Amino acid sequence: MIKKLSCIIGLGLLLALSACSSDKDKVQTKPLAAVQNPASLKMVWKGSTGDGDGKTAIDFAPVLMDGTLYTASRNGNLVAYDAEKGRVIWKQKSKIPLSSGPTVGAGKLFVNDDEGELLVFNASNGTKLLTLNLPNQSFAAPAYGNGIVVVKTVDEQMVALNAEDGTKIWSYEGNAPAMILQGGSSPTIDNDIVVQGSADGQVTLVTLDKGQLLWQRPVVQPNGISDIARMVDIDADPVVKNNIIYVASYQGSVVALDKFKATSIWQHSLSTRNNLALTDSALFATDTKGRVWAFDLNTGKVLWRQNKLFGRILTAPVVVGDNIAIADNMGDVHWLNQADGHFVARVQMDKKGIVSSPVAQGNTVFVMSNKGAVAAYQL
């Protein structure tokens, strides 16, 4: 039986609560100025996964794997596209609404539904293979590595399942606060280690084969009287690069941690619900007020900050060539130069808005709107 948490706050309610704060704290959307000398931009193809509800707070980020773009929508549609041409390879429909974006590994597609189930499909043709019961709902995409699928549920449990037959390998019990943001970070599998960010601001490392705890530490401390003020959810997926873990939290910081010592290398105050984007020298992030940040990857020094999207609800950034691409709740997609953050190009994709993170391959960016429209753009 699925356990119910005290309160799961979606994006709409969070914004409504924020609007009730003082005038000092209110975020006002700035009108967009035209991009100066915009780069040439073309739509390569457009499709529709369809039946998006138009208001989801869940990041249904598409997945790129071996030339195929896999997409999922809140209302249960799954569509696999040829990433180059946009041709539909297969379609599938779940009778139950989906609660996460997809993950692909070992020739299979994994996705969570509203009834606390992990659905498993053949990634080549969309045939449904398995329906696996989870201990609770999950709004975070599953993680795959070395033949194992790891799912983090809303009550902060991690469950590891055999990717072939769905048998349970291990589970790890975390602690969920009384109030959490709808969404949540996916576990990150780094070789034989699982890295999890939790709604209570903790980072946890366990072994992939047995789920044994290696270390756990908070990266942010709750601060305030109300439950809202004390929310410090880590909704950004942890990123591991050169044995350093990069993680960011809501009403907290972006932090770089030594994977072996669990010590902080650098941190910078930042409130975000979105994933981070990394290159060999820089880390890019979007915050809850609509600002875009670039940090030196090694020192945490701020390289630049772009304020001209202030007030918009931004997606995670994605690295595309010499630029980064970001979408927003008004349906615009923006390209910013990595070196200094100036706008390179912009297009309005869907007035219904975009919550799901874009993905990129080479100079092509793939975007899915809240209504399920899918488009590929190329500079």
Image (cartoon, rainbow, N blue to C red):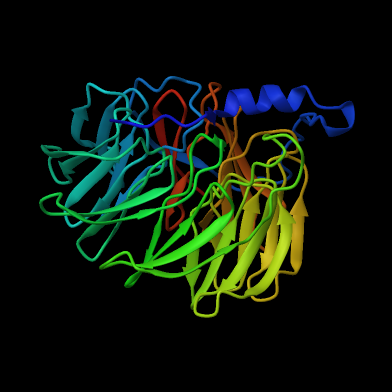
Looking at the image, how many numbered discs can be counted on the residues? 0
The image shows residue 69, relative to residue 349, as above or below, that is below
The image shows residue 299, relative to residue 195, as above or below, that is below
| Residue closest to the eye, 119 or 217 | 217
The image shows residue 266, relative to residue 344, as above or below, that is below
Quadrant, the N terminus: top left
Can the viewer see residue 322? no
In the picture as drawn, the residue positioned furthest to the right comes out as: 24
Quadrant in which residue 29 is drawn: top right
Quadrant in which residue 220 is drawn: bottom right
| Residue closest to the eye, 311 or 187 | 187
Q: Which x, y percent locates residue 320?
A: 51, 56
Instruction: Tell me what residue is drawn at x 54 percent, y 46 percent.
Output: 199
Along the horizontal axis of the image, is 80 left or right of 131?
A: right
Instruction: Tell me what residue is drawn at x 37 percent, y 27 percent.
Output: 74
Instruction: Tell me what residue is drawn at x 56 percent, y 46 percent.
Output: 274
Quadrant in which residue 375 is drawn: top left
Can the viewer see residue 261? yes
Along the horizontal axis of the image, is 264 left or right of 69?
A: right
Q: Which x, y percent locates residue 240?
A: 48, 68
Along the horizontal axis of the image, is 221 left or right of 98?
A: right
Q: Which x, y percent locates residue 207?
A: 34, 69
